[in-house]
Amino acid sequence: MIRDMEQITIQSRIYVAGHTGLVGSAVLRRLEREGFSTVLTATREQLDLRDQAAVNYWFKANRPEFVFLVAGTVGGILANSTRPAEFIYDNMMIHATVVHAAHLYGVKRLLYLGSSCIYPRECRQPMREEELLSGRLEPTNESYAVAKIAGIKLCQAYRAQYGCDFISAMPTNLYGPNDNFDLTSSHVLPALIRRFHEAKLEGRREVVLWGTGSPRREFLHVDDLAEACLFLMRRYDEAGHINVGTGVDLTIRELAELVASVVHPDADLVFDPSKPDGMPQKLLDVSRLNALGWRHSIELADGVGSTYRWFLEHQREM
């Protein structure tokens, strides 16, 4: 059932789990822009989201009415490949503790944010919501994907057994302010920005990039995602997850050429085919979200430009 969610107001008590990260900080900016007056947050030092007792205590003391569950351990191919135990443990524990506490302490509505990594490696493109669990996962991020699938099923289970108003959204690849630009753990777009920037500073023309450059990827600016999250919190009310993206993709080579044109126009691109490509293509079918009335507004070229400007202004803090 789809309905307007009138009970969320600017006076509502809203908890953003993971507020310092890429997505969480964007959700905070969006809530501030719309005038929400009571937004609750907690740093990692204040609250370990892997600790059920601590999370229960925090929910009991703060009584949030609406929860954006956007916390998690994330990273690119290298991070997923070398830290699989950390990725599956952290993410499964984080969503389990928050969802359970939200049930125990009467949260009116919770939005759980997953990832397009949940879909099978050989999934039909564009990937529809119905393709979940229809085939084998991509090996390079299997642990992360399993944890995110468990999060979807967790929300569905609490909805079915307890009547909890918990929903799930699956975004495509994200980028924007507050992204992780560390070359050992970042996703492809911020990693490209960092690589081209460092090559420019060092006076190098040649920039070596992982893989063949042939995989196709879709990218969504995190501020668009934050807008979509609030839209879904107000308007989406189904047990099944919903995709969030642009519905447009490009090859990694084309992405690298775009980033180079913004950061280091004189760069020469060299691809290392001995490194993994990941899934051949990851393009979301966003027709259900579009039918509800939401579409992205930040085009990739503009988003890359603004993200690089943010990087330049904040690189000393990294």
Image (cartoon, rainbow, N blue to C red):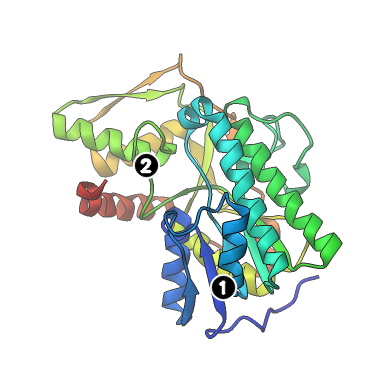
Q: Position of residue 254 (x, y in %)?
A: 42, 35
Residue shown at the point (62%, 54%) measured from the top left: 52
Near-viewer residue (41 or 308): 41
Q: Earlier in the sequence, mark 2 or mark 1?
A: 1
Per the image, the residue denoted by label 1 is 61
142 with respect to 274 (left or right)? right
Identify whether 204 is placed above or below 50.
above
Quarter location, residue 61: bottom right
Q: Position of residue 252 (x, y in %)?
A: 45, 33
The quarter of the rendered structure image containing the C terminus is top left
Q: Position of residue 184 (x, y in %)?
A: 38, 31
Residue shown at the point (27%, 44%) measured from the top left: 262
Amino acid carrying mark 1 in the image? Ala
285 with respect to 173 (left or right)? right
143 with respect to 225 (left or right)? right
Amino acid carrying mark 2 in the image? Pro
The quarter of the rendered structure image containing the N terminus is bottom right
Q: Secondary structure at mark 2?
A: helix
The residue most toward the top is: 274
Q: Secondary structure at mark 1?
A: helix
**Of labels 2 and 1, the one closer to you:** 1
Per the image, the residue denoted by label 2 is 190
The residues bearing labels 2 and 1 have C-alpha atoms spaced at a distance of 38 Å
Identify whether 288 is placed above or below 284.
below
Residue 119 shows in the view: yes
Quarter location, residue 257: top left
23 with respect to 103 (left or right)? left
Near-viewer residue (173 or 166): 166
Q: Position of residue 238 (x, y in %)?
A: 77, 64
Near-viewer residue (156 or 205): 156
Residue shown at the point (61%, 57%) measured from the top left: 53
